[in-house]
Image (spheres, grey):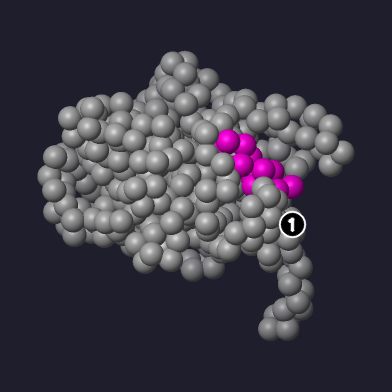
Amino acid sequence: MKEVTPNYPDAYIPYGTWGGSWFPAWHTSPLAEVDIARFAAESMAYVLGKRGIPISKLDYLISGSTIPWLYKFWGSPYLSHSFGHRLPGFHLEQACATGLQMIMKASAHIQGGSHTVVGALGFDKTSNSPAGVFPNQGTYRRTEVISDIWDNFGYDPASGQQGFNQATGETSMIACAGRAARKYKLDFSEVAEVSFLRYQQYFDAKDKGLLDKILFPLEILDVRGQPMGIVDGDYGIRRYTSVDQFKGERQLDTCVAAGGQTHASDGMFTLLITNKEKAQELSPNPEISIQLIASAEYRTGAGFMPDSVSFSVKGLLERTGLTMDDMVAVYDHNPFAVNDVIFSKLLDYDWHKMNDTGCPLVYGHPQGPTLLRVTVEALEKAVSVGGGYVLVFGCAAGDVGISAIFKVNDSKGGN
C-alpha cells in the first residue's frame, strides 16, 4: 500500500464503534411520528452502549441534519442533554454532504487538540417535515410558505430550476440528473444495468447479514412511552428480479426512471472520531486503525450535480498522488444511477466495482446520516479484504461534490 501523509495524522475512527437505524422510506414506519432529534440522541446512547462504550467517554458532539426539528435552535448541547451526558458542540448541515462534513470537522477538532473523543450524530426525518412561514417584504407576495423537504427539492435557487410536475413526478433534482445525462450522452440501457446491479448488491449484502453488523432494530415509543413498533429494515424497497424491469420504466427525464433514483427516508447514524491511543482503547478490534487521509469539495455548473463528484474525486486523487487502482473500496451517495455512469466515464472506472454492499440509490436518502452510513459500509468492506485505501464521495445541493479518502490498516490482515 502506498504511503500518503494524512491531512489529519492524529485523528482516527475507532473500528466497530458505530451504528444506526435502518432507513425506512417516508411514512412506512413509526419514525414518521416521532421527535427525530430526541430519538436520534437516545439511539446514539443505545448504539454506543451495545458497542460497550459509555456515553460518558465523549467530550464533544457534532450533530448533522438538514430538515428543521423541534428545538433545533439549541443544537448539539440539547441533543447531548437528551442522552444524559451534557456536552459542548455544534450542529452542521450541508445537504446530502452533511455526513462527510461531520467527519471532517470532527477530525479537525481532534487534530487541533481541543477535544479527545468526538461523537458524530446524523439524522433526518423526511416524513412529516415542517412548513416554514417567512415574512418577505421584498416580494409582491409578502409571505412565503415553504414545505421544507419538497419545496427545497423542487426548486434550486442557484439554477432557477423550479417546480414539481404532478404529471411526471419531476422535480429540479430529477431535472439536473436528466440534464447531466444529456451532457454526457448516457445510454438508458447502461443506466438501467447500473440500477439493477445496485439492487442486487444491496439484497445480497442484506441476505448475508452484512448490514446487521452496523444497523440496529430500534423500538419506537410514543410520547407516553408506549411501543409503536420496531424499525428493523429499510422499508419501502421494491425487489426487482430482472434488468428488463428497469428498462421498461418510463423515463421521468433523460435516463431517470423510478428504479434509478433514490427515495425519501427517515433515520439516524453515529460514529466516533478520536486519537490513536483512544481509538485502540475504545475499539473491540484495536489492531484495525482507520484514518481520514484527505478530503475535497468541488462546485460544478449550476444544475449539473451528478458530475460534481467526479471533479471532486479527480482533485483529491491529484493532491494525494493516489489512483483509483489504489482503492480497495469505492462507495458513493448516489441519488441517481446517472451519477455512477458519469463517474465511470470521467474517472475511467468500472461501475461494477462500486458499492459492494449497497447504496442510497436503493435504501433511501435521509440526508443527514446518509454519508455516515455509506462511509461505514465502505470501511467494513475494506476491513473484510484486509485493509487498504477507501474512497467515499457524494453530491449535494444541486451542484456540489464532496469526497474523502480513508486508510484502513489491519495488522492481522497484512496492511
Q: x and y percent of residue 231 in the render?
A: 66, 29
- Residue displayed at 56% across by 63% down: 89
For image coordinates 31% across by 43% down, the residue present is 290
Determine whether the residue tagged by mark 1 lies in a helix, strand or loop: loop
Instruction: Look at the magenta stretch and give its main secondary structure.
Output: helix
The x and y percentages for residue 116 are 43, 56
Q: Is residue 45 magenta?
A: yes
Looking at the figure, which quarter contains the C terminus?
top left
Q: Do we see residue 277 in this rendering?
A: yes
Disc 1 target residue: 70
Instruction: Using a 10 Å C-alpha cutoff, classify the residue at mark 1 as few (fewer than 14 neighbours), some (14 to 19) or many (20 or more).
Output: few
Residue at x 62% of width, y 27% of height:
217
From the viewer's perspective, is residue 356 above or below residue 371? Answer: above
Q: Which amino acid type is marked by label 1?
A: Leu
Question: How far across and how far down the image is residue 166, in percent?
Answer: 66, 46
Residue range highlighted in magenta: 35-49
In the rendered image, residue 311 lying in the magenta stretch gets the answer: no
Furthest residue toward right: 224
Front residue of 173/200: it is 200
Residue drawn at (51%, 33%), measured in percent from left and top? 51
From the viewer's perspective, tell me whether residue 406 is left or right of residue 131.
Answer: left
43 left or right, relative to 35: left
Q: Where does the image place residue 146, in percent across and percent down from the top left? A: 71, 62
Query: Which part of the image, by quadrant, shows the N terminus?
Result: top left
Between residues 305 and 101, which one lies in front from this camera angle?
A: 101
Could you tell whether 162 is left or right of 182 in the image? right
**Outermost residue to the bottom:** 138
Where residue 22 sits, quadrant-wise, is top right
